[in-house]
């Protein structure tokens, strides 16, 4: 770990900064600053701009479209993205299924999917959770029965984020119920246009429709869409979950949020919205959370450095997820408190808030929305179980 | 290499039984152990090669302090080598350094920083102790408390107010008008109250110029806090280990208590705090070579994290051990007390959070 960036790294920072200044569309930047909901079109548009530069999938292996960046460069990229208020590329594509296909996919699957994943030509969703399989994910029951060159899928997934936008789903299905529950799980890629798939929206407490139920009724999936071996899906899923968890720490997002909170602290104090005592309290709260955020960021750098030297830290992803989500939730609390009663009115179609007030109506939905982060990706209690077992040996 | 040798040293020579015995006897620390540390070269480590040291950086000090922390070492490494030695390195003239570094490195000369005062803010740079001109020299009058290893010191580095502002003086412990009262710190580390009553001090005793004292102390306290952060990480790592082992071996209701999820989750909370603290101790050590503003903010953040982490780990370790955790013959309680003392020294977590809040945080320095 070095604190001083080299000349090359400083030049890289400038290159990233210039690129973002020139290429991040203003309307997207504003939505990000105001914490408003990004639509599918927003995310696709931005990921394609990044991908054209080769920066949508920097962490992938270089021969699959990744960048040969050092840990310091990855850190710089993440930080500059946050400082520029740039949205992150779609995690389902970039952090989850992409790396799995790079590592475990066949050559045919790589040719067919990877470029489209990077360019967001295909929007992917994650078919893991089921009504009876949440924290106990391995107890999933959605069945896949072999019928010639196809699997026939019957069952149900739930909490499927943005399934309504999805072209494809990566899913865990049960091909064998006779052994241990972790065995007999198979990892499949499912075309969402296949007959027999029904997507039903679930409205969440933030008033948004991000989550869905997905039903499978005799859905036929070609065997060639299987990742790796039949019955070994749990192994691939664990890889994916680790990568998902590291991503959930979202340190860049929290940094960006911190910058925004500092700006609000200043503006609201000047307007007299915040009393001197409230301002002092907020400043202390921001300093507290920033210290933890910095500690977490450095911990992530240590993990990356150890990993690149061939000493992967056990359960590091769980530690990052645990603390990263606590910090994200703390930030949303602080913004919610700043909004006060002005934040009661929900966003409404056709009513556009004044530019400087956009954050107010977004504060409560964002606060309610972010309660999910300590639940999904393996609840924080599950992460503690994992750490207790793998690191502490309890 | 350094890490291995100092870790082997504490593992072989400083088990917890030894530490308990040393704490009870004589001065509350062992001159024999101190000699061994001198022979290992540890006492020369951070001093410049030209003064007879090894030119170690903050990283080497971090490695040593972490190992000393694991064993809760009571010898005056922090007071002599880090604190008073730090003042010498930062502000000492060539003559002042050369007269002392060799003897410090050989384990023959002990120095202590006399800065804290009764009735003063918990942490400050400008002391009330006064130094008045007296011919070519000075006379120092005032009371100092929490002088770490003060009763064993051959010389004090004393902070005092002059007409030109705060200054630092090197004062021999046997100079006139000095009264020393030895006290035992709750963490086992000896402290002393030192009163100066018109103590005569020569012109050559001045460390830096009058008025430079606060700048020197500001730098010195950053170094001190980086070292304490590393010591705390050593203590925390050892404490997390001890606690985890205890959870695996203590049987109640017919099973190891570590099989209970409520306790597992607390142990995980401790581990997470340890990792955050370790990251910040590394940041602190690496920041010592950074420009003043960056260094100062980073180390403030590190000390704040150390304080928060130390409290969680110390309290939880005692709780998870149950009654054994509050007995004086068991290590965990002593680790808890040293972590508590480390938070109190050179600005506690709240102090550093306040500082960062006033400065608009860290981000600008990142």
Image (spheres, coloured by chain):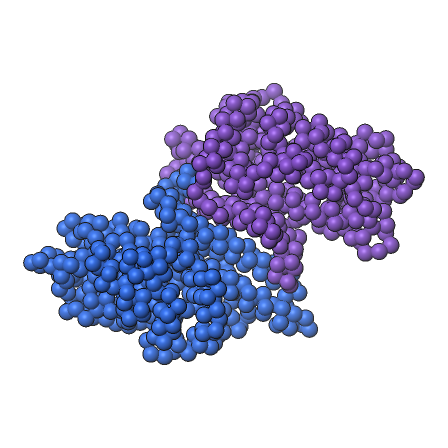
Name the one closer to the observer, A288 or A74: A74
Name the one closer to the observer, B366 or B166: B366
Rendered residue at 23%/66% (across/down)? B155
Rendered residue at 68%/40% (across/down)? A99
- x, y percent for residue B103: 27, 67
- x, y percent for residue A233: 78, 47
Q: Is residue B321 visible?
A: yes
Rendered residue at 30%/50% (across/down)? B218
Residue A349 versus residue B267 in the image, above or below: above
A207 to the left or right of A287? right
Rendered residue at 86%/43% (across/down)? A144
Exactly how many numbered labels are in the figure? 0
Residue A117 versus residue B30 in the image, above or below: above
Task: Tell me the shade of chain A.
Answer: purple
Quarter of the image for residue B95 reads bottom left
Residue lying furthest left = B135
- x, y percent for residue B293: 35, 43
Task: Tell me the shade of chain B.
Answer: blue
Q: Is residue B160 visible?
A: no
Residue lying furthest right = A148
Quarter of the image for residue B44 reads bottom left
């Amino acid at each position: 770990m070095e604190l001083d960036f080299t000349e090359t790294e400083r030049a890289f920072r400038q290159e990233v900064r210039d690129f973002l200044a020139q290429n991040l569309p203003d309307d997207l930047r504003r939505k990000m600053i105001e914490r408003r909901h990004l639509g599918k079109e927003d995310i696709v548009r931005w990921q394609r701009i990044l991908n054209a530069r080769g920066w949508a999938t920097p962490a992938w292996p270089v021969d699959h479209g990744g960048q040969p960046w050092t840990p310091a460069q990855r850190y710089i990229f993440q930080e500059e993205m946050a400082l520029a208020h740039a949205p992150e590329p779609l995690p389902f594509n970039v952090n989850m299924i992409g790396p799995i296909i790079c590592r475990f996919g066949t050559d045919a699957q790589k040719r067919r999917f990877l470029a489209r994943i990077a360019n967001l030509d295909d929007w992917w969703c994650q078919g893991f959770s089921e009504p009876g399989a949440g924290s106990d994910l391995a107890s999933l029951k959605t069945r896949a029965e072999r019928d010639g060159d196809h699997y026939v899928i019957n069952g149900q997934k739930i909490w499927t984020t943005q399934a309504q936008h999805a072209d494809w789903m990566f899913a865990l299905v049960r091909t064998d119920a006779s052994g241990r529950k972790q065995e007999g799980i198979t990892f499949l890629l499912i075309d969402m246009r296949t007959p027999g798939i029904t997507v039903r929206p679930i409205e969440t407490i933030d008033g948004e429709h991000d989550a869905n139920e997905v039903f499978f009724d005799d859905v036929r999936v070609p065997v060639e869409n299987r990742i790796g071996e039949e019955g070994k899906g749990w192994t691939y899923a664990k890889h994916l979950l680790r990568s998902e968890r590291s991503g959930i720490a979202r340190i860049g997002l929290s940094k960006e949020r911190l910058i925004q909170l500092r700006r609000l602290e200043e503006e609201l104090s000047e307007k007299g919205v915040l009393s001197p005592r409230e301002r002092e309290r907020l400043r202390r709260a921001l300093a507290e959370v920033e210290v933890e955020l910095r500690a977490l960021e450095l911990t992530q750098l240590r993990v990356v450095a150890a990993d690149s030297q061939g000493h992967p830290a056990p359960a590091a992803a769980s530690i990052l997820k645990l603390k990263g989500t606590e910090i994200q939730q703390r930030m949303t609390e602080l913004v919610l408190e700043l909004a006060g009663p002005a934040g009661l009115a929900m966003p409404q179609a056709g009513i556009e808030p004044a530019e400087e007030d956009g954050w107010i109506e977004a504060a409560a939905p964002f606060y309610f929305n972010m309660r999910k982060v300590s639940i999904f990706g393996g609840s924080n209690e599950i992460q503690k179980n994992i750490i207790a077992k793998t690191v502490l040996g309890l | 290499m350094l890490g291995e040798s100092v870790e082997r040293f504490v593992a072989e020579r400083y088990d917890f039984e030894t530490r308990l015995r040393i704490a009870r006897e004589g001065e509350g620390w062992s001159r024999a152990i101190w000699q061994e540390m001198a022979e290992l070269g540890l006492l020369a480590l951070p001093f410049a090669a030209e003064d007879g040291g090894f030119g170690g950086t903050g990283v080497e000090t971090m490695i040593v302090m972490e190992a000393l922390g694991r064993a809760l070492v009571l010898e005056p490494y922090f007071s002599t080598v880090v604190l008073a030695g730090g003042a010498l390195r930062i502000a000492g003239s060539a003559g002042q350094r050369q007269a002392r570094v060799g003897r410090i490195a050989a384990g023959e000369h002990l120095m202590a920083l006399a800065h804290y005062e009764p009735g003063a803010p918990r942490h400050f740079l400008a002391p009330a102790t006064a130094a008045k001109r007296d011919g070519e020299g000075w006379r120092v009058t005032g009371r100092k408390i929490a002088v770490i290893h003060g009763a064993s010191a051959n010389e004090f580095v004393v902070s005092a107010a002059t007409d030109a502002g705060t200054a630092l003086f090197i004062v021999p412990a046997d100079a006139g008008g000095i009264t020393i009262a030895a006290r035992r710190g709750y963490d086992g580390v000896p402290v002393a109250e030192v009163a100066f009553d018109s103590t005569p001090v020569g012109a050559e005793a001045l460390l830096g110029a009058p008025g430079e004292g606060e700048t020197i102390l500001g730098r010195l306290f950053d170094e001190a806090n980086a070292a304490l952060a590393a010591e705390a990480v050593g203590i925390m790592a050892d404490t997390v280990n001890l606690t985890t082992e205890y959870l695996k071996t203590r049987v109640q209701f017919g099973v190891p208590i570590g099989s209970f999820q409520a306790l597992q989750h607390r142990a995980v909370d401790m581990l997470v705090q340890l990792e955050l603290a370790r990251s910040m101790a590394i940041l602190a050590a690496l920041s010592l070579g950074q420009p003043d503003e960056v260094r100062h903010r980073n180390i403030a953040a590190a000390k704040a994290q150390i304080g928060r982490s130390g409290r969680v780990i110390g309290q939880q370790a005692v709780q998870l051990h149950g009654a054994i955790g509050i007995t004086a013959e068991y290590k965990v309680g002593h680790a808890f007390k040293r972590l508590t003392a480390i938070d109190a020294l050179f600005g506690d977590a709240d102090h550093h959070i306040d500082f960062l809040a006033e400065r608009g945080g860290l981000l600008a320095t990142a």
